[in-house]
Image (spheres, rainbow, N blue to C red):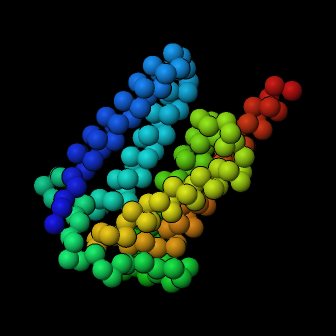
């Protein structure tokens, strides 16, 4: 059994990001504050997604529980490929809405930040594909963890959240353009 603590996982991600950004600065000898802020916000967005997806929401002694990889419990994978089968299957309406809104909302920043950081992804189709790809990657990474389940509903809600984020960005751009005219 292997445990992945939240603090260690997030620390590795932050250190990797620092080294990656430092390497980019050394390679290009340029530093754009606006772009760096957007990239930092994107990193925070990915870290929040990682927290919500991979680490149980309950805590013990105010400590986030680790993600556990139990090699004896990997198979069979917990996967649902039928849309809407388990989406409403919760003990309480609160838990159901928390799942739906949470899966949708945590990808809104992805839909806003992706086109701002990566100009070549600044289209509905490419931003949607990026959100879908990130969500699909998360669902695949969850497969070997018995405490996690890969679900098509999560993939659809995450992608819809990314689409909503892109819509918000387009609305902001339209308003800015209308104000200038």
Viewer-proximal residue among 98 and 169 = 169
User: Residue at (61%, 61%) from the top-left corner?
Assistant: 160
Count the labels in the image.
Answer: 0
**Could you say where residue 97 lies in the image, as x and y percent from the top left?**
47, 68
Viewer-proximal residue among 165 and 122 = 122
Residue 84 seen: no
Residue 149 picture quarter: bottom left
Furthest residue to the top? 29
**Could you say where residue 139 lies in the image, as x and y percent from the top left?**
44, 65
User: Residue at (72%, 46%) from the top-left corner?
Assistant: 123
Viewer-proximal residue among 109 and 29 = 29
Furthest residue to the right? 181
Question: Height in image: 133 above or below 171?
Answer: below
**Could you say where residue 152 lies in the image, as x and y percent from the top left?**
52, 73
Query: The N terminus is located in which quarter?
Result: bottom left
User: Residue at (29%, 59%) from the top-left corner?
Assistant: 55
| 163 relative position to 106: left or right | right
Query: The C terminus is located in which quarter?
Result: top right
**Could you say where residue 128 lies in the image, as x and y percent from the top left?**
65, 55
| 100 relative position to 16: left or right | right
Viewer-proximal residue among 154 and 101 = 154
Question: Height in image: 13 above or below 71?
Answer: above
Residue 26 seen: yes
Furthest residue to the front? 27
Question: Height in image: 71 above or below 165?
Answer: below
| 181 relative position to 79: left or right | right
């Amino acid at each position: 059994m292997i445990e992945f603590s939240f603090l260690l996982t997030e620390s590795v991600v932050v250190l990797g990001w620092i080294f990656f950004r430092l390497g980019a600065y050394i390679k290009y000898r340029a530093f754009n504050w606006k772009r760096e802020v957007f990239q930092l916000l994107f990193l925070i967005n990915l870290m929040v997604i990682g927290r919500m997806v991979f680490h149980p929401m309950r805590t013990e002694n105010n400590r986030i529980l680790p993600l556990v990889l139990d090699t004896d419990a990997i198979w069979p994978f917990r996967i649902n490929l039928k849309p809407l089968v388990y989406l409403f299957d919760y003990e309480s309406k609160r838990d159901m809405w928390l799942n739906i809104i949470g899966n949708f909302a945590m990808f809104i920043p992805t839909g806003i930040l992706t086109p701002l950081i990566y100009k070549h992804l600044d289209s509905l189709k490419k931003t949607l594909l990026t959100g879908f790809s990130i969500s699909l990657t998360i669902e695949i990474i969850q497969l070997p963890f018995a405490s996690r389940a890969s679900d098509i509903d999560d993939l659809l809600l995450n992608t819809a959240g990314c689409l909503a984020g892109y819509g918000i960005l387009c609305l902001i751009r339209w308003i800015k353009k209308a104000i200038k005219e």
